[in-house]
Image (cartoon, helix red, strand yellow):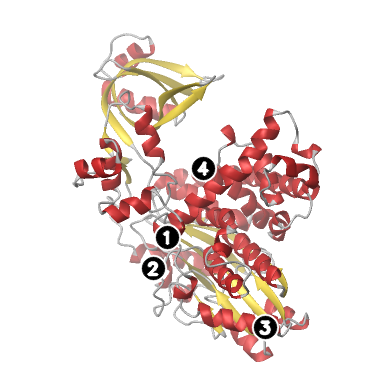
């Protein structure tokens, strides 16, 4: 079930149109996103380096830089311990690469998801001690590592924590603890990802060592920070928006033209060496691993968008940590030759293909289980004992989307059950789990996502307690579709669509543009696909504009809804192309379609409503 509403915000539309030379549509979109002040609008439309906050504003970052500088000068051995998701991978790469540029004796370790679990632990500290490591720096983890910190203190290992996750009740006893969510921290953008936290520290060190000036060290890694920011689903506003926007810009202006130039000349990347590649890069220094991955992903129109990063490129990094070792993704980014980079990129892509198939199988199994039992709980706790533990977060997200309920998916591990949680905006998952904290052996995360481990015998009690404490209403669990405006689908010009594209990248905190139109007359329904499993809908609006809509949703459910509202005779008339009473509402996004050099405005249909 869905509830459609239209933004009803007011603002100085005429003033915005005049000051920024925008159409009324663009002015409306800005106001809908709460952007009404000139400075806000300028920063939003034209984000640049001035939105990057100084590293020293992060509490204790200067203290961490002092300590690390001293350790490097003393030739102490340093180890970076990261995480196995895209954010953790980028964090580890950026911090390791930066310290190597400074001349540090540094290596890295990415936990094995199965063997080690999430974050730094006692065993990793003990191994660091056995390896002669003097200083351990975490990135994208460590804020909950109280036991590991105590062990580091016992062994005399210096521990620097850099993290961005929510604070636990007790902080670890680290030598330095950096997290923008600390109450003492005055950093303006609290919701930066782990890679940005790590890059702020790296940038400060590079500046002190006179390798880079001011923000240059941060900007050197902007494409990797954009991948981390988008994949970690942090709000794409203020500094995060600038990171994502400028990172995508660099990829599209530096990496993708190389791939397109080679394709236009019929030259496979595999036929080149690292040295022969240089004639196609216009003298730009590109990361061979990222270039190779973008190449093997075969991105449409040689364009990288937030969608490409979130659903094509990013998952290839994540897949290494899900089905193998995330260290392979670091190996990709550190590839010394083009041949090595291509081999590593193909491995990452292959792992992601395997991950997608396994995910689809378990998602269907979960749907069948829930539909068979009837969905009664407000907080869903789904047990998939045979599922690979790396997939439970993705599956929880799919279930959450389908049933619009906070969802936890659990799988069996050696010492109990382990799972991931995904939530809806109306429910703070981290706080919900905190109310049941005694049931877990380990848990942590955000309001919208969390990870947890617990004894098998506690699962039923967890389900019971979460639902007893849950205060969600039926209204909360209806999917909300908010339209920017009600606009006929045939009125957009290319200029307006180009203005809309200025609002990208879209994501958390900056929702995609969505327009709607109602009272669309159905001219004909047709079966679509080889086996007729889909539907094509010919519609006409009140202005006489026609459009064909392919519908790839649940065909049987869609037709049953039409029949329930309008009757079988009207449904038969629609399939015969005769006059009928069926009317639809359409939620869509306008876009530019380019074919054979011709550019036309088309619409991308997102939702249909009878």
Mark positioned earlier in the residue sequence (4 or 3): 3
Q: Residues within 10 Å of mark 1 (few under 14, many from 20)?
A: some
Indicate the quadrant where residue 512 lies: top left
Give coordinates of residue 478: x percent, y percent: 32, 46
The reply to whether dot 4 and dot 2 touch (C-beta < 8 Å) is no
Determine which of the numbered discs, if any, sits on residue 188 in the image. Answer: 2
> Which residue sits at x=63%, y=60%?
89
Compute the Cα span from label 3 to label 2: 29 Å
Compute the Cα span from label 1 to label 2: 10 Å
The reply to whether dot 3 and dot 2 touch (C-beta < 8 Å) is no
> Which residue sits at x=67%, y=69%?
116
As drawn, 357 above or below 323 = above
Name the front one of labels 1 and 3.
1
- Identify the residue position indicated by label 4 in the image: 305
- Identify the residue position indicated by label 3 in the image: 71
Mark positioned earlier in the residue sequence (4 or 1): 1
The reply to whether dot 4 and dot 3 touch (C-beta < 8 Å) is no
Q: Secondary structure at mark 1?
A: helix
């Amino acid at each position: 079930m869905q509830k459609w509403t239209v933004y009803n915000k007011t603002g100085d539309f005429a003033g915005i149109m005049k000051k920024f030379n925008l159409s009324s549509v663009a002015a409306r979109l800005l106001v809908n996103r709460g952007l009404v002040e000139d400075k806000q609008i300028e920063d939003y439309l034209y984000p640049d380096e001035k939105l990057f906050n100084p590293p020293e504003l992060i509490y204790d970052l200067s203290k961490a830089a002092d300590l690390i500088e001293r350790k490097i000068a003393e030739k102490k051995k340093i180890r970076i311990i990261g995480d196995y998701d895209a954010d953790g991978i980028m964090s580890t790469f950026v911090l390791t690469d930066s310290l190597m540029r400074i001349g540090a004796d540094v290596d890295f370790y990415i936990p094995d998801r199965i063997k080690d679990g999430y974050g730094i632990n006692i065993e990793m500290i003990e191994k660091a001690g056995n390896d002669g490591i003097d200083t351990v720096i975490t990135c994208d983890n460590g804020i909950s590592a109280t036991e590991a910190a105590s062990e580091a203190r016992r062994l005399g290992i210096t521990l620097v924590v850099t993290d961005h996750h929510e604070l636990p009740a007790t902080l670890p006893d680290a030598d330095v603890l950096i997290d923008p969510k600390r109450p003492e921290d005055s950093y303006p953008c609290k919701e930066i990802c782990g890679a940005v936290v790590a890059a702020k520290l790296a940038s400060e060190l590079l500046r002190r060592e006179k390798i880079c000036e001011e923000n240059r060290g941060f900007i050197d890694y902007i494409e990797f920070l954009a991948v981390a920011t988008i994949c970690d689903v942090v709000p794409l506003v203020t500094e995060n928006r600038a990171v994502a926007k400028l990172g995508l810009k660099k990829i599209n202006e530096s990496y993708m033209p190389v791939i397109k130039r080679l394709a236009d000349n019929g030259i496979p990347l595999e036929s080149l060496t690292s040295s022969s590649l240089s004639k196609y890069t216009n003298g730009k220094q590109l990361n061979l691993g990222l270039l190779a991955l973008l190449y093997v992903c075969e991105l449409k129109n040689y364009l990288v968008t937030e969608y490409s990063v979130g659903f094509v490129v990013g998952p290839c990094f994540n897949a290494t940590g899900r089905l193998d070792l995330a260290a392979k993704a670091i190996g990709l980014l550190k590839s010394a030759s083009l041949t090595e980079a291509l081999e590593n990129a193909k491995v990452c892509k292959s792992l992601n293909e395997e991950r997608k198939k396994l995910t689809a199988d378990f998602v269907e199994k979960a749907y069948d289980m829930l539909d068979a039992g009837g969905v009664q709980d407000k907080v869903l706790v789904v047990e998939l004992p045979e599922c690979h533990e790396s997939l439970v977060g993705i599956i929880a997200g799919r279930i959450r989307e389908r049933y619009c309920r906070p969802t936890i998916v659990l799988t069996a591990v050696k010492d109990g059950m382990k799972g991931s949680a995904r939530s809806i905006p109306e429910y703070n998952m981290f706080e919900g789990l905190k109310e049941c904290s005694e049931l877990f052996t380990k848990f942590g995360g955000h309001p919208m996502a969390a990870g947890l481990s617990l004894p098998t015998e506690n699962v039923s009690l967890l389900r019971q307690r979460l639902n007893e404490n849950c205060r969600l209403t039926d209204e909360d669990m209806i999917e909300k579709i908010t339209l920017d405006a009600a606009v006929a689908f045939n009125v957009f010009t290319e200029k307006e669509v180009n203005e809309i594209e200025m609002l990208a990248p879209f994501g958390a905190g900056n929702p995609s543009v969505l327009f709607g139109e109602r009272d669309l007359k159905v001219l004909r329904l047709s079966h679509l696909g080889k086996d007729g499993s889909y539907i094509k809908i010919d519609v006409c609006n009140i202005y006489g504009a026609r459009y064909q809509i392919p519908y790839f949703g649940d065909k049987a459910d869609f037709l049953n809804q039409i029949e329930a509202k309008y009757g079988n005779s009207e449904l038969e008339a629609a399939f015969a192309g005769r006059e009928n009473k069926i009317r639809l509402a359409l939620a869509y996004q306008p876009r530019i379609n380019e074919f054979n050099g011709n550019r036309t405005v088309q619409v991308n249909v997102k939702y249909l409503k009878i």
